[in-house]
Image (cartoon, rainbow, N blue to C red):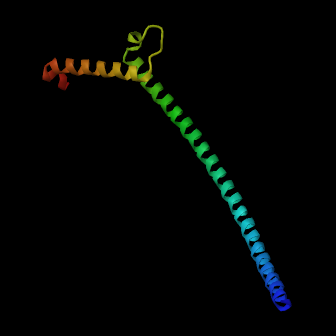
Amino acid sequence: TEQALEELKQEFSTTRSTMHEKTEALKVNINHLEGRMEEENANAQRLDQRINASERDTHGSQRDMLDAIHKQVSDVYQQCGLEEAGRAGAAPDTLFMLGELENKLEDLLSAIGQMPPGYVAK
């Protein structure tokens, strides 16, 4: 029985040593994975910031472009003498002005269609 006890102690010591080595290897692996997770989280945060910045830039440039288009349409609208026909007291929006310009153009094309061909060719 003493020999069995000695074998049991030896087996326990070997198992304990093996488990300690495996535990240390797992701790190293956990630390490595936690480091990778921190790197990936930082990378995701940087990408989110870039996306947000890009969205802000896109929104700003779209707003600038729409403002420029509105200004150009407004200039044409005024040059066609439609400013007085606009909404009373309120500045017309771009779509309203484009609709009015389209109506004016259709009226002019209709009038041209009724004119003598020789007169239109001049």
Along the line of sight, which residue is nearer the eye, 120 or 21? 21
Q: Residue at x 14, y 23 (%)?
A: 118
Numbered-mark total:
0
Is 118 situated left or right of 19 in this image? left
In this view, 88 is above or below 11: above
Identify which residue is drawn at 79% across, 85% down: 11
Report x, y in % for residue 71. 48, 25
Rendered position, 5 above or below 52: below
Rendered position, 32 above or below 121: below
Q: Residue at x 42, y 11 (%)?
A: 87
What is the x, y in percent for residue 84?
Answer: 40, 10
Residue at 53% x, 32% y: name it: 63
Image: 64 above or below 22: above
Viewed as shown, does residue 120 lie left or right of 21?
left
Dividing the picture into quarters, in which one does residue 92 lie? top left
**In which quadrant of the rendered view does residue 3 lie?**
bottom right
Quarter holding the C terminus is top left
- State the image coordinates of residue 106 (x, y, percent, origin top left): 25, 21
Quadrant in the picture for the N terminus: bottom right
Taking depth in this image into account, of 122 and 54 the one nearest to the observer is 54
Quadrant position of residue 14: bottom right
Image coordinates for residue 41, horizontal then vertical, percent: 67, 54
Residue furthest to the bottom in view is 3
Q: In this view of the protein, which residue sits in the foreground, 114 or 36?
A: 36
**Residue most extreme to the top:** 88
Residue sitting farthest toward the front = 1
